[in-house]
Amino acid sequence: VSAPLKVTDCAPFDFETVFHLHYSRIARIIARVVRDPARAEELAVDVFWKLWRSPEAHGDSAAGWLYRTAVREGLYELRRQVRRERYEWLLHLVSRPGTPEEIHAAAEEQQHVRHILAKLDQRKAELLVLRSQGLSYDELGDALGLNAASVGTLLRRAQQAFRREYTKHYGEPYGR
Amino acid sequence: MENRMDDERWVDARLETLDPPEGWRPDPYKAFRRLEQRDRSAAGAAWRRRGVLAAVGISVIGIALLVVPMSQKCAAAGCTDRTPPPTRSFKESGAAAAPVVCEIYTDYQCPACARFYAETVPLLVKEYVETGKVRILHRDLPLPAHPYARLAARYANAAGLLGEYERAANQIFRTQAQWSISGDVESQAAQVLPAETMERVRDLVNHDARLDETVATDLAMAREDGITQTPSLVIVWKGRRQVISGAPDFGLLKGFLDRL
């Protein structure tokens, strides 16, 4: 009688299928943070490129790895944008005309939300962005390496921190 | 509790403003093409790096040739080689001039590899190797999780040195379920190899440390290719190495090869 063989290390990984399954969601997660959809698609391709070059991430955990990497890429980009805007303001370079995407994205509240996400602790920002994209507690746990039981508590703390920071900088928004 | 719900609703309302523009649809097909393009550029850069390494390698070979007379002195002193040094040639099959080389990384104790060998490799041989389109190069990638994979590779490579690689490798994969428990690869190989050959295979497996060199070479290539799982393929075409982690079924592989 033969014992069952372990196949965990040698199960085939179909990259193309994973790509087509997750690409849209990954691009959308990044687009929530970086305002420009075209840039979000570029960064989404970067994320899949990293997956392609990281065989250790292939397998059952690929989805979690993708979400984690996507939200981090998005937040890094957001912080770069915020820094750039600050320097441009200091150098009086803000007078350049905005692209149609920038003009569209210039809605005040959207700007405020993004600035607070850029200031927030990395883990809290990741939780909020992924949750707002509709990830379940289990998916959040997988993506960020958290115990599913503690996701609710951490998410609540992240929401409180976000609200606190937001109101500290911008006050309560109208109508809420 | 009420505060908690309040915070949640309040934050959700703020984050809703981040919804991407209505009507925007990410285009996965365009993105995949972009990814393929990037992979091709990276493969080209890796190939250029290999060119530099090859130049260094040629220099090393040149120096080694100067050292050959020393080994002849060794032979005169009585330290003889019982077998020629292991080469990878026995792991190759197909026309030397085939435009495409398909390198197959496997672990003899990996069930998915055994399936790939039983189901896909014969079709690949029939349709592409026998017609001169593809040359196959087998590579060993024994995974740490499989305690007898290296031993099985030693048996297959020993048989390979004696001209029986295909027969031994096929038998080892076919009987994987039997020897995977006990590690008794020998008795399975003995079922298909002539007694005299088997005697020499045992001798090589037990005494010839150089058998591991072919495995070490393959492991080094796997590291360079970024491969850590089996089965995996590397399709070499026009100087480019396309890694396919996880073995595709024959239909998918055929689609890929026909596009080259």
Image (spheres, coloured by chain):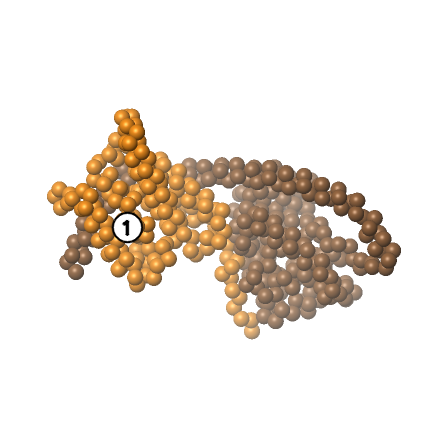
Along the horizontal axis of the image, is B56 left or right of A38? right
For the residue pair B70 and B104, the one nearer the viewer reads as: B70
Q: What kind of element bears circle 1?
A: helix
Along the horizontal axis of the image, is B149 left or right of B38? right
Q: Position of residue B29 (x, y in %)?
A: 42, 39
Dot 1 amino acid type: Leu
Q: Position of residue A113 (x, y in %)?
A: 24, 43
Residue at x-position 25% and y-position 31%: A103
- Parent chain of label 1: A
**The residue positioned farthest toward the top in the image shown:** A96
Looking at the rendered image, the quarter that the N terminus of chain B falls into is bottom left
Q: Position of residue B125 (x, y in %)?
A: 64, 49
Along the horizontal axis of the image, is B255 left or right of A69? right
Which residue carries the number 1 mark? A128
**The residue positioned farthest toward the right in the image shown:** B76
Looking at the rendered image, the quarter that the C terminus of chain B falls into is top right
**The residue positioned farthest toward the bottom in the image shown:** A1
Query: Chain drawn orange, letter?
Result: A
Residue at x-position 53% and y-position 47%: B244
Residue at x-position 58% and y-position 48%: B224
Location of residue B32 (image quadrant): top left
Chain B colour in the picture: brown
For the residue pair B251 and A83, the one nearer the viewer reads as: A83
Count of all numbered marks drawn on residues in the image: 1
Q: Is residue B246 visible?
A: yes
Q: Is residue B194 visible?
A: no
Q: Position of residue A9 (x, y in %)?
A: 51, 59
Residue at x-position 73% and y-position 44%: B61
Q: Is residue A78 above or below residue A134?
A: above
Query: Mark 1 packing: few (<14 Cα in 10 Å), some, or many (20+)?
Result: many
**The residue positioned farthest toward the left in the image shown:** A175
